[in-house]
Image (cartoon, helix red, strand yellow):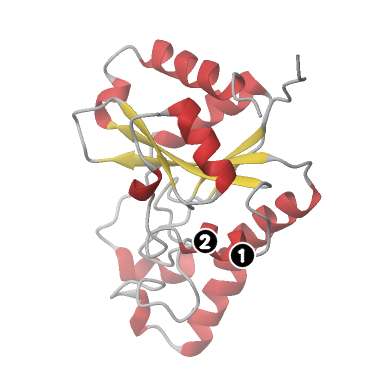
Amino acid sequence: MPHLRLYHAFLTVPYAGNAVPLRFGSFFKNRPVDYNKVVDVANAISDSLGIACFAHTTARALVDVQSALGCGTLFSTISLQFSDEDKQHILERYYFPYRIRISKFLQNHIKPIVWVDVLLSEETTNVWQWYGIVPNEITQNVMAQLNPIIQLTESKSDKDFEFQHALAKLYTDQEIAYVTLLVSKNFFSNNEAENRAEICRQLSSLSV
């Protein structure tokens, strides 16, 4: 019987909060300093499984860490009006550090590995849902175990997940699985502890 090797995994939460640095606070007077509750879910899963978790807590309205340089969604309608100097400061202080940390983690980690992007979903039909992001061989394998109902053709577009699609070009189709865990608001009012435990069970049972 062939040996089954468990996938390694790690989590990212690109929209973990909406904190705005004091330097730009006057432009976001009506934006409360808050965080996305999915970061609590991701941290709990991280602690339970002993896997890494990278969260970005700066407001998406300041800079979108999922967007590519030059993309129309990189800066919001507010931050787009900032000076070139301020925008470069935002990139160097908040955008690049998050992406570099993940890039270096992938470079130095044993493959294969499952990258799980944890996001809040407005959908209320499902408490949580798995989707494939990059339609490569290993993602198809992982999705077949996590959510066999979702076909590879239903993977998320590179417009919404530019970072993953860009990094996928640097690795083979067998090295990194790119999936997203969409957590609905019902997750927090409907047996949250049991939901987290089931997600941990599914992730820990992945094999190749």
Tell me what residue is drawn at x 32 percent, y 22 percent.
Answer: 188
Quarter the N terminus occupies:
top right
Front residue (pair 168, 14): 168
Q: Is residue 54 left or right of residue 81?
A: right
Q: Is residue 56 left or right of residue 132?
A: right
State the CA–CA distance, disc 2 to disc 1: 7 Å
**Residue that label 2 marks:** 165
Residue type at mark 2 is His
Residue 96, image x, y percentages: 61, 67
Q: Is residue 207 left or right of residue 56?
A: right
Tell me what residue is drawn at x 64 percent, y 22 percent.
Answer: 49
- Residue 6, above or below 97: above
**SS at mark 2?**
helix
- Residue 14, above or below 64: above
**Residue that label 1 marks:** 169
Residue 59 is labelled as none
Residue 145, image x, y percentages: 49, 26
Q: How many circles with numbers are drawn on the protein?
A: 2
Front residue (pair 136, 6): 136
Residue 15, image x, y percentages: 43, 50
Classify residue 35 by image quadrant: top left
Tell me what residue is drawn at x 43 percent, y 54 percent.
Answer: 19
Q: Are marks 2 and 1 in contact (CB under 8 Å)?
A: yes
